[in-house]
Amino acid sequence: QVQLVESGGGLAQAGGSLRLSCAASGSIFTVNDMGWYRQAPGKQRELVATITSVGNTNYAESVKGRFTISRVNAKNTVYLQMNSLKPEDTAVYYCNAEGIRRNYARFGSWGQGTQVTVSS
């Protein structure tokens, strides 16, 4: 099993910042892509940002220039620095990781989600 534990959500004012963290643990051989997704009430889950094991990144248009995804491979941890927050960023943010277990089977795991609320 591979577990993802998120932290860092909370309440921020518009224009403020928050930093999310997500650590993967368990029977891991290697973690390939990691990413953040979010789901607002009444909406589908959407991609926020992803990062490969060599640091290639991809962002949703709505967060480009405001959010930065990064990772520390040695810690199997991914971060999301969120600046210039807007009320429309309010959502539950989920961490995702894909890779290979020690038994060489592929895995794809999700975190439990962390609430981000931005007040105007």
Image: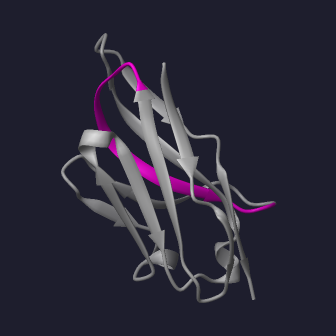
Does the stretch in magenta take in 87? no
Q: Is residue 74 left or right of residue 98?
A: left
User: Which residue shows up at 34% across the image and 40% down it?
Assistant: 76
Q: Residue at x 30, y 15 (%)?
A: 102
Q: Is residue 71 above or below residue 59?
A: above
- For residue 48, above or below residue 107: below
Q: Main secondary structure of the magenta part?
A: strand
Residue 4 drawn at (x, y percent): 51, 37
Q: Which residues are magenta?
A: 26-41
Q: Residue at x 38, y 18 (%)?
A: 27
Given the current orientation, which residue lies at the most extreme right position? 42
Say above or below: 31 vs 91: above
Residue at (30, 62) in percent of width and height:
57
Q: Quadrant of residue 81?
A: bottom left
Q: Position of residue 48 (x, y in %)?
A: 50, 63
Q: Position of residue 35 (x, y in %)?
A: 43, 51
